[in-house]
Image (cartoon, rainbow, N blue to C red):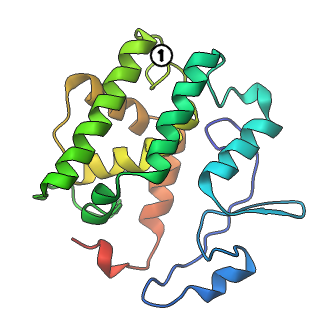
């Protein structure tokens, strides 16, 4: 939303993973974030939020215009949404972490290889038209932003084409705002401190 220039008000909610996060029930029946509150609607799933935003702001270009590309973008966004559990568990997102490599197992290596293949394929399909997965920035890129952060934090080796994509993501003004906000957070989630 920030990248697309869509106005919204952000409220940061402290998470407490050892507890049940019951304080989130005020916003989210799943006790998870993010949550978008728009009028009487509470939308508590990241893909549902992104689809809703794309629907109410059709001119923001949040999905590729071409139907085949749009379908492909949805597929890889959904794969990110539902997958890569080994990567998520072993390399938790932590923008406070000093970027250093971390040894990982075969399951994480398989997730990394799949993500690299997805990124490479998308960049090759786009034919160099723009710096992102489908040329211009889309929802698919938003879904992979946490992976870009993990690859950077854990110094995951990446091919030149993937590194260029990561650099483009990290150069976005919206990325810089996101990272700055994360670095201002003063709480620590112990499970993410590896």
Q: Nearer the viewer, residue 17 or 6?
A: 17
Q: Residue 188's image quarter? A: bottom left
| Neighbours of disc 1 within 10 Å: few (<14), some (14-19), many (20+) | some
Query: Image point 69% across, 73% down: which residue?
Result: 28
**In the rendered image, the vertical position of residue 73 relative to residue 79, given as above or below:** above
Q: Which residue, as the protein is rendered here, is positioned at the far right?
A: 40
In x, y percent, where is residue 173? 52, 39
In x, y percent, where is residue 96? 32, 64
In x, y percent, where is residue 149? 35, 49
Query: Image point 26% across, 53% down: which residue?
Result: 153
Q: Nearer the viewer, residue 76 or 32?
A: 76
Image check: 93 left or right of 14?
left
**In the rendered image, the vertical position of residue 95 relative to residue 65, given as above or below:** below
Query: Image point 70% across, 42% down: which residue?
Result: 51
The C terminus - image quarter: bottom left
Q: Which residue is mark 1?
A: 130
User: Can residue 155 be seen at all in this image of the molecule?
Assistant: no
């Amino acid at each position: 939303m920030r990248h697309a220039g869509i106005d919204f008000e952000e409220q940061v909610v402290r998470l407490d993973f050892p507890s049940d996060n019951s304080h989130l029930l005020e916003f989210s029946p799943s006790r998870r974030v993010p949550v978008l509150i728009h009028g009487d609607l509470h939308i508590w799933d990241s893909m549902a939020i992104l689809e809703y935003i794309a629907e109410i702001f059709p001119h923001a270009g949040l999905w590729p215009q071409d139907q085949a590309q749009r379908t492909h973008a949805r597929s890889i966004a959904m794969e990110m949404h539902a997958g890569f559990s080994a990567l998520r568990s072993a390399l938790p997102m932590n923008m406070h972490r000093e970027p250093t490599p971390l040894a990982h197992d075969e399951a994480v290596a398989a997730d990394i290889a799949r993500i690299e293949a997805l990124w490479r394929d998308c960049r090759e399909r786009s034919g160099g038209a723009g710096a992102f997965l489908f040329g211009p920035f889309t929802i698919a890129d938003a879904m992979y932003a946490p992976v870009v952060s993990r690859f950077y934090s854990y110094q995951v080796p990446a091919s030149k084409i993937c590194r260029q994509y990561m650099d483009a993501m990290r150069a976005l003004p919206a990325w810089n705002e996101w990272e700055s906000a994360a670095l201002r957070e003063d709480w620590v989630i112990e499970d993410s401190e590896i």
